[in-house]
Image (spheres, rainbow, N blue to C red):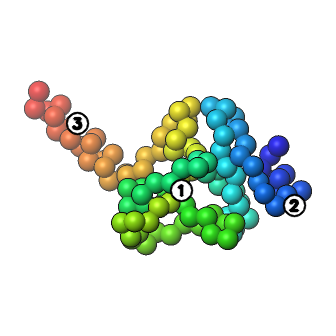
Amino acid sequence: MDPKELWRTGQDQIQPVDCPQCRLPWEPVPTKDHDWIMLEPDFYAPAHTVPPRQRWYVRQGWAVQDDSCPRPSQQCRIAHALACPEQELPDLWQWLTALREETLRRAGRLF
């Protein structure tokens, strides 16, 4: 069943749904802007190790993002898309990608 359909049917407890790419479960959680985020089920990461725009917290049944600097003990959730083996990993740190491209270009000139 489509996660949005689960919301329209008024079910209180949304169960994990299978990812269409890898067939592993993901957990649909509503956001306050009436959208959905598919979170990796039963996985909590140390928030300081996750890029700011990829940190999700479930508060009172809603998925929210908080870009403030997390405490070392704070844990967050991540979208299933980051863990899905069948999806291409997004460019999480554009500055690092640019640096790696520049380093590759410089190395190419040296050799």
SS label for mark 1 = loop
Q: CA distance from mark 3 to mark 2?
A: 53 Å
Q: Residue at x 46, y 54 (%)?
A: 45
**Rendered view: 89 above or below 70:** above
Viewer-nearest of discs 3 and 1: 1
Q: Amino acid at mark 1?
A: Arg
Mark 3 or 2, nearer chain start? 2
Name the image quarter holding the N terminus: top right
Contact (Cβ within 8 Å) of mark 1 with mark 2: no
15 to the left or right of 71: right
- Percent across and percent down for residue 23 are 67, 32
Q: Amino acid at mark 2?
A: Gly
Categorize mark 3 by other alpha carbons within 10 Å: few (<14), some (14-19), many (20+). Answer: few
Q: Where is mark 2, residue-wise?
A: 10
Q: Nearer the viewer, residue 74 or 19?
A: 74
Q: Nearer the viewer, residue 82 or 45?
A: 45
Categorize mark 2 by other alpha carbons within 10 Å: few (<14), some (14-19), many (20+). Answer: few
Mark 3 or 1, nearer chain start? 1
Q: Where is mark 1, residue-wise?
A: 77
Q: Amino acid at mark 3?
A: Leu
3 to the left or right of 26: right
